[in-house]
Image: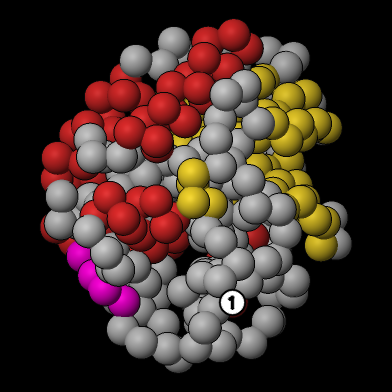
Amino acid sequence: MSEFRLTQISDTHLGRRFPGLIANFHRVCERIDAERPDLVVNTGDVAFDGPTGRDDMVFAKGLHDALPVACRYIPGNHDIGDNPTAIGPAPKPPVSEAHCRQFCDIVGEDHWAFEAAGWRFIGLNSLVMNSGLAFEAEQFDWLSAQLARTNGRPVALFLHKPLFLDLPDDAETPGTSIRYVPQPARARLIEMLGTIDLRLVASGHVHQRRDFTWRHTRHVWAPSAGFIINDRRQDRIAIKEVGLVEYRFRPDSFEVRHVRAAGQVDVDVEELLAQMGGEH
């Protein structure tokens, strides 16, 4: 295969009670149907509330099953709960083994690897990092084995949370600790990735579209496919809009296209909170 086309969607936050998010997902599906990539990757928050609403997971997976191409997934905090962090409040709800198993049972593998067009593609569950769960140790052991098999191939990494804001050793703060892969797991992960030719880190979670390069690695933050978070509730780092990201991988090179599907609407989080009956 001389070219591999991949579409990244993220933070779809699907649930039966949110018609605006469902409508945006259908617009994304129409774009995917027209473009027919080789693979779709959802980088997490597939469902609106997986930990306390199993039906959200079932509903979200059903909508994804209607996509005309194969899809892989990695979980977000709205799917399996959030990471504990060294600073800041305890996550609500925290990531748990039960929620990880539910994700795998309903949606599919929470970490994976494959090769295409001369690249190694790796998807990681970033929410188990720093959790102390058995899933965390098992995944790090698995990742070590996968990295040993890259054999010099360029690597594209997909995970829900960005590794960092600007630099690997960015300090954690109470207001941003849940936004990025937490320390000390972040330092361990970055050290492991330093042994390979890491060309791309693709993430979601922040609901802002961003694209920057640190050293020789390009970091792409996919926007939410579903909704935006206004400036009153979240500081503005980059572009706040709904959309998706399209990639073309060729041996030793890749292209990135930032896309907004025709008909997608910037649903504001306030609309969702009103549908839920107030603040949550």
The image quarter containing residue 117 is top right
Front residue of 55 and 123 = 55
Residue at left 33%, top 58%?
A: 273
Residue at left 80%, top 56%?
A: 212
Look at the picture and state if 226 lies above or below 170.
above
Q: Which residues are magenta?
A: 91-96
Mark 1 residue crowding within 10 angstroms, few (<14) / some (14–19) / many (20+) = some
Magenta-colored stretch includes residue 92? yes
Disc 1 is placed on an element classified as: helix
Can you give x and y, in whole percent of width and height, for residue 118 in the image? 71, 27
Q: Is residue 213 visible?
A: yes
Residue ID for mark 1:
187
Q: Amino acid at mark 1?
A: Ala
Look at the picture and state if 179 lies above or below 253.
below
Magenta stretch: helix, strand or loop mostly: loop
Magenta-colored stretch includes residue 40? no
* Quadrant placement of the N terminus: top right
Can you give x and y, in whole percent of width and height, for residue 186 in the image? 55, 73
